[in-house]
Image (cartoon, rainbow, N blue to C red):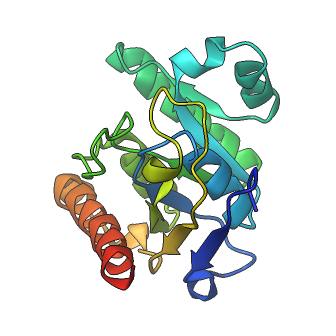
Amino acid sequence: MIGGIQYQIVGLEKLDKEGNYVFVANHESAMDIPLVFAGLPYHLVAIAKIELKRIPIFGWAMMAGGHFFVDRRNHAKALNSLDKAKDSMAKNPRSIIIFPEGTRSLNGAIMPFKKGGLVLAMNMGISVVPIALCGTRDVMKKKGLTLNSQTIELRIGSPIDTKTQPYDSRNEFVASVRENVVALKEEWQNAV
């Protein structure tokens, strides 16, 4: 349970318990983050927008936890942040969660993915795991503070080896990962 909300994890058996991954998720609610950290049994850090760093207590906790911040408005600074993340990961391997839509979806539709975090995964040679966060938008609306009681779900796809992905095909790779996340969410919708 997360704050009284029941959750389920589907597909955890697809992962190596000792592995490190870049988890790639859709984003539709503030409940996504607790669901990811509760449901994935890995040392996990996030690549987050720099604006989150400025939130009292929350931002401080993220900094203390070693999460990475990216200034999306400044391309050079964003690339520098990703290079620092790559160096940090080489020294201290762990898993990363990214929400490549860049913001929460208001209607639940999965928006196009930004490339940065997925290119980082390619550069590091770390497998990418598509995951779908399902039902979180209905539990906690954007700008809402109340939780609606219903079961939410984290669906895990199969790891994708980035070592076989040529850099020149990064746009196709990003689109393919997004399609995997969409398919996982559709599986959940069909099962509900």
Quarter occupied by the N terminus: bottom right
> Can you see residue 53?
yes
Residue drawn at x 37%, y 17% is 76
Q: Nearer the viewer, residue 108 or 141?
A: 141
Quarter occupied by the C terminus: bottom left
- Does 80 sit above or below residue 132? above
x, y percentage for residue 5?
Answer: 68, 58
Describe residue 5's horizontal placement relative to residue 127 as left or right.
right
Q: Nearer the viewer, residue 74 or 34?
A: 34
- Does 23 sit above or below residue 56? below
Residue drawn at x 58%, y 67% is 151
Describe residue 152's horizontal placement relative to residue 187 as left or right.
right
x, y percentage for residue 86?
Answer: 57, 42
Residue drawn at x 24%, y 52% is 109
In the rendered image, which quarter is residue 6 located in?
Answer: bottom right
Q: Nearer the viewer, residue 86 or 22?
A: 22
x, y percentage for residue 23?
Answer: 52, 59
Residue drawn at x 82%, y 28% is 64
> Can you see residue 95?
no
- Does 91 sit above or below residue 72? below
x, y percentage for residue 20?
Answer: 65, 65
Q: How many marks?
A: 0
